[in-house]
């Protein structure tokens, strides 16, 4: 394999495996609901990444970034959604679920949709892909590089699910699941505030 492809694969793998809403959601869903739900979450996230890749290749992400109003709307929706997910993780019996008017929100509890929305509404992911494909070496072979990024995303995120699904590791983590969930919920809320601050401070 071309050395450039290997470098890109390793760069992307380190980026997606670093702490963030995608990884947090995968770990939380896998621990609390099992391997199948973990993989559904991964499927939603890699679908979002595929959307970003196609949008970047066709110049749509650059269009969004060049329009501050659109970018800030996406950031606002992202912050609010991540905050909602964080609250749901910390307080599973949050009153919204008991309210009949929240039927619409309940639909977004499906792990696939959680993964998809969490990824698509992340403005930092938008900037990440814009930054990658602004590099000259990426522009010379965009479709092959996009394919590599997507495959690496599938392998990387699926590996997290498989690792947590190992009985010994899973049992140890589940023993402190309540504390882990609170930590994940707080992380989601903090990340939501970071996104809102990051986006609305941009000129």
Image: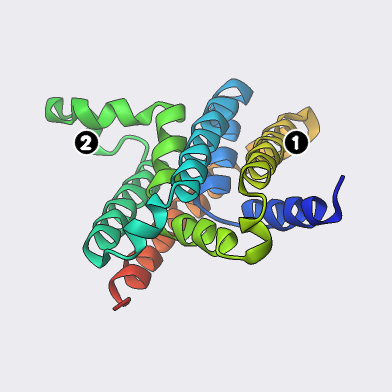
Q: Is 87 placed left or right of 175 in the picture?
A: left
Classify residue 153 by image quadrant: top right
Classify residue 158 by image quadrant: top right
Q: Residue at x 52, y 38 (%)?
A: 50
Q: In this view, does 119 lie above or below 165?
A: below
Q: Which residue in the structure is indicated by mark 1?
A: 163
Q: Residue 75: give x, y in percent of width and height.
A: 31, 58
Q: Residue 164: give x, y in percent of width and height.
A: 70, 35
Q: Residue 78: give x, y in percent of width and height.
A: 33, 52
Residue 122 seen in render: no
Q: Is 90 placed left or right of 203 in the picture?
A: right
Residue 96 is labelled as 2
Mark nearer the N terminus (1 vs 2): 2
Q: Along the line of sight, which residue is nearer the eye, 179 or 125?
A: 125
Q: Which residue is drawn at 47% across and 37% down?
A: 115
Q: Is residue 95 above or below residue 65?
A: above
Q: Residue 96: give x, y in percent of width and height.
A: 22, 36
- What colour scheme does the image use? rainbow
Q: Is mark 2 on a helix, strand or loop?
A: helix
Residue 4 seen in render: yes
Q: Is residue 94 above or below residue 33?
A: below
Residue 143 is labelled as none
Classify residue 159 by image quadrant: top right
Q: Is 153 placed left or right of 66 in the picture?
A: right
| Disc 1 to disc 2, C-alpha distance | 33 Å
Q: Along the line of sight, which residue is nearer the eye, 174 or 188?
A: 188
């Amino acid at each position: 394999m071309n050395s450039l492809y290997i470098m890109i694969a390793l760069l992307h793998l380190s980026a997606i495996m670093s702490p963030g809403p995608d990884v947090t959601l995968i770990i939380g869903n896998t621990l609390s609901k099992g391997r199948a739900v973990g993989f559904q979450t991964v499927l939603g996230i890699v679908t979002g990444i595929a959307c970003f890749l196609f949008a970047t290749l066709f110049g749509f992400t650059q269009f969004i970034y060049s329009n501050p109003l659109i970018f800030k709307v996406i950031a606002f929706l992202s912050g609010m959604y991540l905050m909602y997910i964080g609250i749901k993780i910390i307080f599973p019996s949050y009153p919204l679920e008991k309210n009949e008017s929240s039927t619409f929100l309940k639909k977004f509890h499906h792990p696939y949709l959680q993964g998809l929305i969490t990824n698509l509404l992340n403005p930092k992911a938008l900037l990440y892909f814009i930054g990658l494909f602004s590099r000259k070496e990426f522009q010379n072979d965009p479709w092959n590089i996009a394919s590599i990024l997507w495959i690496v995303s599938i392998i990387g995120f699926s590996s997290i699910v498989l690792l947590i699904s190992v009985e010994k590791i899973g049992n140890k983590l589940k023993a402190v699941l309540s504390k882990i969930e609170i930590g994940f919920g707080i992380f989601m809320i903090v990340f939501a505030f970071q996104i809102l601050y990051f986006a609305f401070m941009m000129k």
